[in-house]
């Protein structure tokens, strides 16, 4: 945790909500499911009553003086925000080599399942808090993998909503295009309750019986043959395959087997990435474009939000002053990798005015949406189901993330004891670390995806 509210203030807030609850119940008014519920949010989400530091020394003691839109929605529903979770400093934009989950102010986030194991990416503190039960529910944010990754590693349920369903207003950004907040909890039911409150519009996400998985069409995306040969992933693939072709079919789901991310998806008349002859070759240039777009948006976005803060003791106000502060304070940087390479690269772009920014963004959005929509339409799929078997994430996940498709992780199991696990970013793929089912739905199908996930979660718990 980077900040925990004073216990007396929390008790006073809880007492006030108790009185409010009595009045509402006596007048037979409906109560939010989050009324009086303790919640922890990631420390890039601004709050009027707590510092917002993103884990950086340069923002130590920084006060925004306002609530982010999702924080406002939580308070309006009667939730008690008890503190701010540690996170990968600046959501990973300080340096490429900083361990995931490390920040100057909070140190290293540990994996709730195994302290020496990889905790997941920038929302790892939120996932750890959820896994340990420090609060009933938590909020993370994601640009690329930052909700789903730590949820998977720490055996909790993480949900990345359809892009735009939840407001980014008042969140310290990486990318104004790709960032989204989302809930991380111990159950699908809790995730649905959180999403119902923080999302825009009047949604009934808590009605988890509204859509049945029976008759739904699910596409699988694991390349079983090659991944069965990996020392770290064979048991994950076997467990995944056993579930998909066993229990999932028992639920009445129609499983469409095959490599759904295939070369046939590359149309000969495509405008972008014409130099790529296979779908696999697209991955690296796609991520390079994504990195450039994020760099441009961060350069302008960080200055815009810092200009709204009520107080920043260090005096930093934009990316240039942030870099200068770090240069003048070596203790602000990770002692193992004392550079700020990513920030320097962001500074080297022209921001939103960079002549390459709009063309790169357009081809990212156009290409990824074209591929993913054709994956769904080619076999009339309702959702995709996959898993992650190592540090490399499936291309379909990257494409769905770029396209803004809703995604949920559901704990499937934990890595067994083995002496053959490989290291990744100074962490081991340690026995006990979680792995998950990952479901990807169509844009706007958040409610349907939650319903499917609840039915899958129920059958997994039945068979534990």
Image: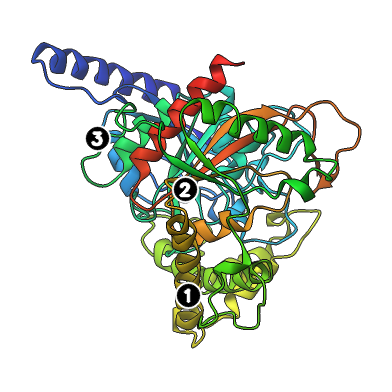
Farthest residue, direction right:
419
The spot of residue 452 in percent (x, y) is: 42, 33
Q: Which disc is residue 4 wearing?
A: none
Residue 85 spot, x, y in % from top left: 53, 38
Q: CA distance from mark 2 to mark 3?
A: 20 Å
In this view, the residue in front, 98 or 47, is 98
- x, y percent for residue 84: 49, 38
Work out which quarter of the rendered image holds the N terminus and state it. Answer: top right
List x then y, in percent, for residue 4. 49, 31
- Residue that mark 1 sits on: 361
SS class, disc 2: loop
- Mark nearest the camera among 3 and 1 is 1
- Residue at 58% x, 76% y is 347
Locate residue 388: give its quadrant. Answer: top right
Location of mark 3 (residue):
76
The answer to which of 363 and 383 lies nearer the viewer is 383
Asked if the residues shown at circle 2 and circle 3 are in contact, with their CB atoms under 8 angstroms apart, the answer is: no
| SS assignment at label 3 | helix
| Residue ID for mark 2 | 52
- For label 3, the crowd category at 10 Å Cα-Cα, with few meaning under 14, some 14 to 19 and many 20 or more, is some
- Residue drawn at the location 64% of the way across and 53% of the way down: 394
* Residue at horizontal 29 percent and vertical 24 percent from the top: 33
155 over 2 or under it: above or below: above
Sequence-first tag of 3 and 1: 3
Q: Mark 2 vs mark 1: which is more N-terminal?
A: 2
Quarter placement of the C terminus: top right
């Amino acid at each position: 945790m980077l900040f925990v509210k004073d216990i007396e203030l929390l008790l006073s807030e809880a007492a006030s909500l108790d009185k409010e609850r009595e009045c509402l119940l006596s007048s037979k008014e409906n109560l939010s499911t989050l009324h009086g519920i303790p919640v922890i949010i990631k420390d890039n989400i601004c709050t009027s009553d707590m510092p917002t530091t993103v884990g950086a020394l340069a923002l130590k003691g920084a006060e925004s003086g306002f609530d982010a839109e999702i924080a406002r929605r939580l308070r309006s529903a009667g939730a008690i925000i008890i503190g701010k979770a540690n996170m990968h400093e600046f959501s990973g934009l300080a340096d490429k080599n900083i361990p995931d989950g490390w920040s100057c102010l909070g140190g290293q986030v540990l994996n709730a399942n195994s302290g020496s194991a990889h905790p997941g990416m920038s929302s790892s503190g939120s996932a750890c808090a959820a896994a340990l039960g420090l609060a009933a529910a938590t909020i993370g944010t994601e640009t690329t993998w930052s909700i789903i990754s730590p949820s998977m590693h720490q055996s909790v349920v993480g949900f990345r909503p359809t892009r735009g369903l939840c407001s980014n207003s008042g969140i310290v950004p990486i990318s104004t295009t790709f960032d989204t907040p989302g809930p991380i909890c111990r159950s699908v039911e809790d995730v649905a309750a959180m999403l119902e409150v923080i999302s825009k519009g009047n949604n009934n996400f808590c009605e988890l019986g509204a859509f049945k998985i029976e008759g739904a069409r699910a596409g699988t995306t694991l390349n079983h043959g090659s991944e069965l040969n990996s020392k770290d992933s064979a048991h994950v693939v076997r467990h995944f395959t056993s579930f998909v072709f066993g229990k999932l079919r028992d639920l009445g789901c129609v499983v469409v087997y095959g490599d759904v991310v295939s070369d046939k998806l590359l149309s000969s008349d495509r405008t972008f990435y014409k130099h790529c002859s296979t779908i696999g070759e697209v991955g690296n240039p796609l991520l390079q474009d994504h990195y450039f777009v994020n760099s441009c948006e961060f350069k302008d976005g960080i200055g815009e939000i810092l200009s709204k803060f009520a107080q920043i003791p260090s005096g930093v106000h934009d990316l240039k002053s942030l870099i200068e502060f770090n240069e003048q304070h070596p203790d602000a940087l990770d002692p193992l990798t004392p550079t700020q390479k990513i920030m320097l690269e962001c500074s080297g772009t022209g921001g939103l005015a960079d002549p390459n920014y709009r063309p790169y963004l357009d081809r990212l959005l156009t290409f990824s949406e074209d591929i993913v929509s054709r994956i769904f339409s080619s076999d009339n799929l309702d959702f995709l189901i996959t898993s992650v078997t190592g540090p490399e994430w499936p291309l379909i996940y990257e494409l769905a993330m770029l396209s803004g498709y809703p995604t949920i992780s559901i704990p499937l199991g934990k890595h067994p004891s083995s002496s053959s696990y490989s290291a990744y970013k100074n962490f081991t793929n340690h026995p006990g670390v979680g792995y998950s089912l990952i479901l990807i739905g169509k844009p706007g199908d958040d409610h349907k995806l939650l319903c499917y996930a609840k039915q899958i979660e129920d059958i997994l718990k039945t068979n534990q």
